[in-house]
Amino acid sequence: THSFLHAQVMKRLTCMTCNRHRDITEFFRDFSLDFGGVERDDVGSMLRTYFTGEQITATCEACGAMSAYMSKYLVCAPRVLVLHLKRFVPNLLLRCYEKRHQPVLVPMELDLAACGVQRRGHISEPGTAPPSYELRAVVAHEGSS
């Protein structure tokens, strides 16, 4: 499964005070995508949101500041792309999870470059663009659990 499903993602944390950065590399078997809160979502925009940078709380090793900007880059794309749509969201008031029922557009072909996924060089693939994937299967769970 490692050779087919593993993706390598580099997270770059850049200090908001001194601009120093550090890189963290992680391996994923799938990408868990959040819903955007719109009437009708699509997998491309959900993937774009996943790879969009964000400001986070993290301690800078150089100056001790507590604010950083995190960017995500695809280092090594998987041969088989697995996406998990996080349909259950916490309702803090009711202390339970609620299921999102809105439809999601799933294209027959997904081009990661068109989704805004940026790629950083990998030793075996310097400067190559993110790949495209053809839809092979969809698993949809129906029910209350």
Image (spheres, rainbow, N blue to C red):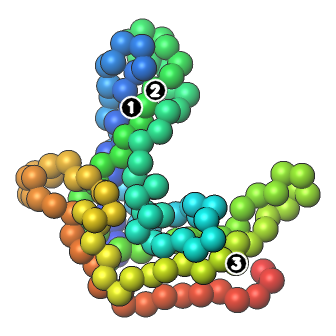
Which quadrant of the view contains residue 143?
bottom right
* Residue at x 15% of width, y 49% of height: 121
Residue that protrudes farthest toward the right in the picture: 94
Q: Nearer the viewer, residue 144 or 5?
A: 144
**Residue highlighted by disc 2:** 68
Residue type pointed to by label 3 = His
Can residue 9 be seen?
yes
Q: Please indicate whether residue 54 sits to the left or right of residue 77 in the image.
A: right
Which quadrant of the view contains residue 137?
bottom left
Q: Secondary structure at mark 1?
A: strand
Image location (x, y in percent) of residue 50: 45, 55
| Viewport quadrant of the N terminus | bottom left
Give the mark nearer the N terminus: 2 vs 3: 2
Circle 2/circle 3 CB separation < 8 Å: no
Q: Nearer the viewer, residue 9 or 51?
A: 51
Give the mark nearer the N terminus: 1 vs 2: 1
What whole-number distance in Å separates the C-alpha atoms at marks 2 and 3? 34 Å
What whole-number distance in Å separates the C-alpha atoms at marks 1 and 3? 34 Å
**Residue highlighted by disc 3:** 101
Q: Secondary structure at mark 2?
A: strand
Circle 1/circle 2 CB separation < 8 Å: yes
Q: Please indicate whether residue 91 sits to the left or right of residue 25 in the image.
A: right
What whole-number distance in Å separates the C-alpha atoms at marks 1 and 2? 6 Å
- Vertically, is 1 above or below 73? below
Badge 2 density bin: few <14, some 14–19, many ≥20, Cα 10 Å: many
Residue type pointed to by label 1 = Leu
Q: Please indicate whether residue 49 sits to the left or right of residue 23 in the image.
A: right
Residue type pointed to by label 2 = Ala
